[in-house]
Amino acid sequence: MNAELAAAVLQATITAMLAMLCFRVWRKSREPHFGWWAVAFSLYALRIGIIIAFLSTMSRGWLLWHQVVTGWTALALLYAAIVFAHRTLWRPWYWLVLAFPLLWSYIAVIKLENFTLAAVPAVLFISGATLWTGIVLLRFRRPETAQVSGLLGWTFVIWGLHHLDYPILRARGAWLPWGYYLDILFVLAVGAGILLLVNSDLANRLQLRTVELERLSRRMVRQHEEERRRLSLELHDETAQVFAAVKMQLGIVRERVDTALATHVDRALSLVDDGLRGIRNVTNDLRPALLDDLGLLPALRSLAADFGERQRIPVSFDSPDTLPVMSDEAEVALFRAVQESLSNVARHAEGAKVHVTLATPPGRLHLRIEDEGPGFAGEAVLERAAESGHLGIAGMRERIAALGGRVDVWSSAGSGVRIDIEIAASEDSQHEAWLTPR
């Protein structure tokens, strides 16, 4: 008796801990199946507590409630599996099924004297509910959870078959106390399987959410680029044209004024030229015409050359003669990455030499921008810069990540900065030869 009581206490403790774990996860996730698993294992722990009370008192009333709670436990596990697999809501006729353990336990314990007649229907009910639970989980076999749900389903199937030995062996003491330890193994296997299965389901949802966020990020980048293009066209077609007309009118005035006023007109013409040059620089930064007209490679070459000329910084540019086909979003992201990297060099690297390198491993494009400036010490510098509102590298990473690429930043104090960007080529490039720039 002492060995059986100790085994029952151990089983109750483990089951109660699993119930508390499911309850805590339910409080955080508010997923209904976690709540029902918490209810199921709480009932299971209550069932073991009733067994302990029965062993201590040998009261027939505890035996009655043991049968009732055992049936409710099996039904709670089944309903938790159904809610998890099918998101099924509670239906009124479920109350009839829930009433069966109470009704039959009263008949079996109070009214019937024949043990076999009393035990067999209850065992068949519990075994059937457990087998049904296993079948529900076996049929819930998404590709990403096939192994876990299969293992969990087969655990319930074997456990359901194990229930059938109750009238033959366990009720006659043949399994004592090893039947408790075997049930503990089933409880641990089911608990581990439930957590692994739900973890896989949550990971799948997280992946779907990540895809949705990437799609949203692409849409935002596309809208951002469209707005930049609109502003660039307005500056080019309206403001620049107004400046050009002003310059033309000033030229006419210049030919007709005397020498005293000519100097002032020349100064005005010079200011108009500066304004036109500034507009061209802004429109080129907003949306370079070369990127739309000629493609990525000429646009990057022009960007590097113009930057070196304006900032008086040596810039080397190495690339193959042709690039794989890239999507419009990828071309814009790569162009903006180089643009942002060169701007950072101008702000922080104090005129250090810059190297821009393009490589084309199979199906991918690798871009490297490195400078010979002072560099910085560690990733923490980038994090502090992002927190203070400097989002250049962070924005670059978001753009590239949204396209399935990767951005790695390497630096240490006194050794410059190296930015490595890798992104997949367009799917069309998997079926086409390398193309010359548009």
Image (cartoon, helix red, strand yellow):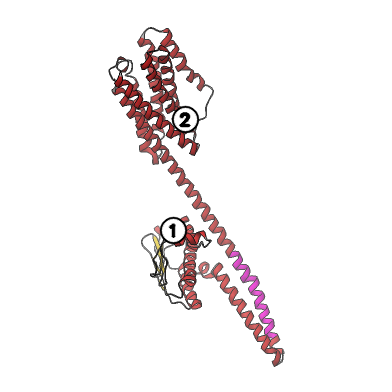
Is disc 1 surrounded by few (<14), some (14 to 19) or many (20+) residues within 10 Å?
some
- Viewport quadrant of the N terminus: top left
Task: Identify the amino acid type marked 2.
Answer: Trp
- Residue 427, quarter of picture: bottom left
Q: Nearer the viewer, residue 178 or 354?
A: 178
The residue located at (31%, 26%) in the rendering is 182
Q: Is residue 118 magenta?
A: no
Q: Which residue is mark 1?
A: 426
User: Label 1, label 2: how many angstroms apart (C-alpha)?
Assistant: 47 Å
Span shown in magenta: 229-252
Mark 1 vs mark 2: give the one in front. Answer: 2
The residue located at (38%, 21%) in the rendering is 127
Q: Which residue is mark 2?
A: 36
Question: CB atoms at circles 1 and 2 under 8 Å apart?
Answer: no
Q: Is residue 248 magenta?
A: yes
- Residue 106, quarter of picture: top left
